[in-house]
Image (cartoon, helix red, strand yellow):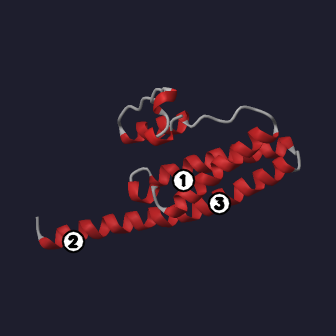
Amino acid sequence: MSLEAISEEIRAHFTEKNGARDQALARSRELIRLCAESIRATHRREWEAAEGKLAAVRAAADALRGVVADYPDLYRAGYTQDGLKEVVEAFATAAIIRNQPLPAPGGRRRYLSQRAGRSCHRAAPLHPRHSAPRGWRR
């Protein structure tokens, strides 16, 4: 393979990754906006509007994850994590205000492991004796 072909392949990869970064940034901003709208609707007790926004939040979060699925560094980037953190806040706020159980994170963990092509098992809960560092036990 010639040096020119190698450099062209590298350039194409960087162009593709840059496009994914731009999309992730835009989708993260949209996700944060949708989460804020959902939280406002929940605080106003506008349940139908809040449920509709939460559905849009879920779809936008899935779209954001899809954009960065092939780029672990983009998934871990601050703007991606900020958007996903707002998703947690939106769903937790809705659950707390409506006196419902908090959503479990297991579904998202399975999603990410499936995208990575490996299985993911939930960790067993720690025995109370092992849940705190040694110096903190009573």
Q: Is residue 92 visible?
A: yes
Which numbered marker is on residue 137?
none
The image quadrant of residue 15 is bottom left
Give the CA separation, mark 2 to mark 1: 29 Å
- Kind of residue at badge 1: Leu
In the displayed structure, does residue 113 sit left or right of residue 39?
A: left
The image quadrant of residue 25 is bottom right
As helix, strand or loop, the secondary structure at mark 3 comes to: helix
Give the CA separation, mark 1 to mark 3: 10 Å
Residue found at x 60% / y 34%: 104
Q: Give how far across and how far down residue 69 sits, in percent.
A: 43, 50
The vertical placement of 38 against 33, above or below, is: above
Q: Quadrant of the C terminus?
A: top right
Residue beneath label 2, please? 7
As helix, strand or loop, the secondary structure at mark 1 comes to: helix
In this view, the residue in front, 137 or 34, is 137
Residue found at x 39% / y 54%: 72
**Dot 3 crowding, Cα within 10 Å, few <14, some 14–19, many 20+:** some
Sooner in the amino-acid sequence: mark 1 or mark 3? 3
Which numbered marker is on residue 64?
1
Sooner in the amino-acid sequence: mark 2 or mark 1? 2
**Dot 2 crowding, Cα within 10 Å, few <14, some 14–19, many 20+:** few
Q: Is residue 126 visible?
A: no
- Kind of residue at badge 3: Glu
As helix, strand or loop, the secondary structure at mark 2 comes to: helix
Total labels: the figure holds: 3
**Dot 1 crowding, Cα within 10 Å, few <14, some 14–19, many 20+:** many
- Kind of residue at badge 2: Ser
Q: Quadrant of the N terminus?
A: bottom left
Please identify the residue farthest to the front as the structure is shown. 138
Residue found at x 46% / y 42%: 135
Which numbered marker is on residue 30?
3
